[in-house]
Amino acid sequence: MKRILLVCCLFGAPAMIPSVHAQKSAAMAKPTISKNDFYSKMGELSKNLGEHNTAAAKATFDALHQMMGKAISMTHDRTAAIKGDAEKKMATEQMTKQRAIYGKTLQLKDNLEANKDQIMQNLQEFGATLQ
């Protein structure tokens, strides 16, 4: 009886490992941030600021802020997975640029209407770093 149980464990367990790995990979997959979505949200922010709709502008800025954070996180994860030195250097430079733009933009959030031009310029630069 013990032998049958041992045989079942030896042959059954390896068959389950790929499906468990696939489930973990799917659960760990992060959504991507597309340039189109980012630029669309930028247009929404510009429209809200142009209409002096502060509440909507703040909500849109918060959404852009979250998108920027996710993009930086995705760049970080991609950089960590890269094996080649040249590619890793390029990805690290991209992440450094994204973080710098993110920081500059976040400092301007307290007065969105007064800082509209600088915010939009920073967001445009950040959007250019998206893949």
Image: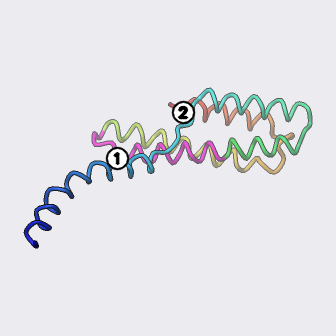
> Disc 2 designates what residue?
129
Residue at x 34% of width, y 45% of height:
81
Compare residues 11 and 77 and report the one nearer the observer.
11
> Disc 1 designates what residue?
22
How has the structure been colored for display? rainbow
Residue 7 % position (x, y):
10, 62
Kindly report the distance in space between the C-alpha atoms of the residues bearing marks 2 and 1. 30 Å
Q: Is residue 14 above or below residue 64?
A: below
Kind of residue sitting beneath label 2? Thr
Residue 68 % position (x, y):
61, 43
Tell which tag, 2 or 1, sits nearer the viewer. Answer: 1
Q: Badge 1: few (under 14), some or many (20 or more) residues near its Cα, within 10 Å?
A: few
- Is 110 contained in the magenta span? no
Question: Is 129 on the left-hand or right-hand side of 41?
Answer: left
Q: Residue furthest right?
A: 52
Q: Badge 2: few (under 14), some or many (20 or more) residues near its Cα, within 10 Å?
A: some
Residue 56 % position (x, y):
84, 41
Q: Is residue 71 above or below residue 127?
A: below
Question: Is 83 on the left-hand or right-hand side of 100?
Answer: left
Picture quadrant where residue 63 is located: top right
Report the span colored magenta: 66-85
